[in-house]
Image (cartoon, helix red, strand yellow):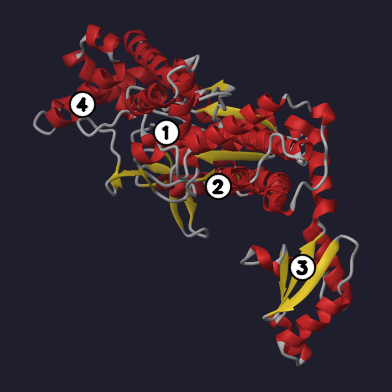
Amino acid sequence: MEKHMLALQLSHILGEPYSREWVYEQLELPKKESFGDLAFPCFPLAKEFKKNPKLIADELAEKLKHPHITKAESAGGYVNVFLDQSFFTEETLKEVLANDRDYGSHNFGAEKTVVLDMSSPNIAKPFSMGHLRSTIIGNAISNLAEKCGFETVKVNYIGDYGTQFGKLVAAYHRWGDDDAIQADPLTELTRIYVKFHEEAKTDPTLIDEGRTCFKKLEDADPEVLELWRWFKDVSLQEFDRIYDLLGVTFDLTRGEAYYNDKMEGVIKRIAGAGLLEESDGAQVVRLDEQELPPCLIRKSNGTTTYATRDLAAAIDRYESFHFAESLYLVGHEQTLHFQQVKYVLDKMDLPWANDMHHVPFGMILKDGKKMSTRAGKTVLLEQVLQEAIDRARENIADKNPDLKNQEQVARQVGVGSVIFHDLKHDRTHDVEFSLDDMLSFEGNTGPYVQYTHVRTKSLLKKAGYEKEDAEVKLVDEKAWPLIKLVRAFPKVVKESYEQYDPSRIAKYLLDVSRSFNHYYAHNQILDSDQEAGRLTLIYSVNLILQNGLEILGIEAPDQM
Ligand code: ARG
């Protein structure tokens, strides 16, 4: 807002060809608070104006006059601009009070739908760190989309099909133990699956058995089908426990197998578009112009592929939801796959293929190496969450033993710390896993933000603050940095969504928390002569921390 206002003023003074948009792009945040609120660098103008930047800045500062600008200074080739703090404070706080829990919302997504393919673990295998990231990041992006007015459809595209299930059934026939599977399905199914691969090295008949079982699954053989359903049910129950802990829900849980009877139709459509080619007995779509390897549609043994199922799923999602955007929250390692899928649809002349976006992310590392879920090396996710909750519980017993609902708060803080730790990192980067880092109350952690929220809440409670008696005026100059942050919230929401980047919200919440704690440490709030105004500011901070944590999918306890 103020940036547009300033850009307009400066572009008027500069005249053609310096448009408002151009000036806007140049504007910077000053390095220090004492340099004001916005800075315009004059260096790019020096050549054209044949003057040194300092002189240009002198002249611009002299000419810049606006009722909401209190001062413009020339310094080191910049024009440093100071905004009218009273005016902007009042405007900001009014805006917060008027919108309350909707503060930071937008409506540019109204009447549009975003589909998110997220979580999508594979049955009969442990829920990996990658699936955790997909779940948490997807959930946050979905919340951001809703804040921007979109309808969202969260789809859990379970990996429940493919030749590996033939192998699993064969392994079950040899070594399956029903009780063990019932007791701990993912561990037991993984164990026999791994055993299958080991034994197959010396016993080639196993591979044939696997193939036969897969063929039976494809032909809907009742015995194999029932086993497969059982594996699926017990796996989903395990996954549900994790989703419950994380507080994540889905609008649709639909696995790959759902698309089996849609394969032939899709292949026909691809062939009808003249795209299907033979290659060594397999059928492929060539993507030479895109400089990509061909997309495998049907293998030489007649089976369809992961890509074929994703093509069917994409078409189905478009036909069901007419999405404005269809997002795939899947790790970097599948980038090629999603490029192929998108280009095949594009070659089929489906214009919405352009609205499909792979939203990749990095890995979670342990001591610099990928955290593996393969047998032996597994750090099972549930254990991680449980450990985080245990530590949070110990912390409470230590620091606040009289707290009510300790179990609930321990869960909120423990799980919140894991989610925040993931989301504060730029999603494209790898993240080093560390429980100590996650759970610290100091530093850049979830508990720190939750704790700051608790502080604001208890201040408001102590004061008996009522929104109705709110005062909206500049309390003092020291509150200005915090006001500016409060003011930025709607913009941060919009940009985080547009960049599919929840880390912007996480970092912003840390900034707000730090700024608030600094302000609180240096200013008396209750019983000061500024109490009413300061409380309105605290109310705004409270609201933002609550809204922001909610976007990230983290609960905000009232006490901790
Ligand atoms: N189940 C897959 C895996 O774990 C991820 C699925 C991602 N979504 C998709 N539409 N392909 O690797």
Upstream in sequence: badge 3 or badge 1:
3
Q: Looking at mark 1, is its residue's CB closer than 8 Å to ligand 1? A: yes
Q: Position of residue 214 (x, y in %)?
A: 31, 23
**Three-letter residue code for mark 1:** His
Q: Which tag, 3 or 2, sits closer to the chain's start?
A: 3
Q: Which mark is residue 208?
A: 4
Between discs 3 and 4, the one toward the N terminus: 3
Amino acid beneath label 2: Lys
In the depicted structure, whether residue 150 falls above or below residue 191: below
Viewer-proximal residue, 304 or 120? 120
In the structure shown, which secondary structural element does the residue marked by tag 2 occupy?
helix
SS at circle 3:
strand
Q: Which residue is mark 3?
A: 81
In front: label 3 or label 1: 3
Q: Residue at x 48, y 34 (%)?
A: 447
Residue indicated by mark 1: 131
Using the rendered view, name the quadrant where residue 76 is placed.
bottom right
Residue flagged by tag 3: what amino acid is it? Val
Real-space CA distance between mark 3 and mark 4, rounded to the nearest whole angstrom? 75 Å
Q: Earlier in the sequence, mark 1 or mark 2?
A: 1
Spatial CA span between label 1 and label 2: 23 Å
Image disc number at residue 507: 2
Image location of residue 66, percent across then percent down:
89, 65
Relative to residue 142, is residue 64 drawn left or right? right
Marks 1, 2: nearer the viewer: 2
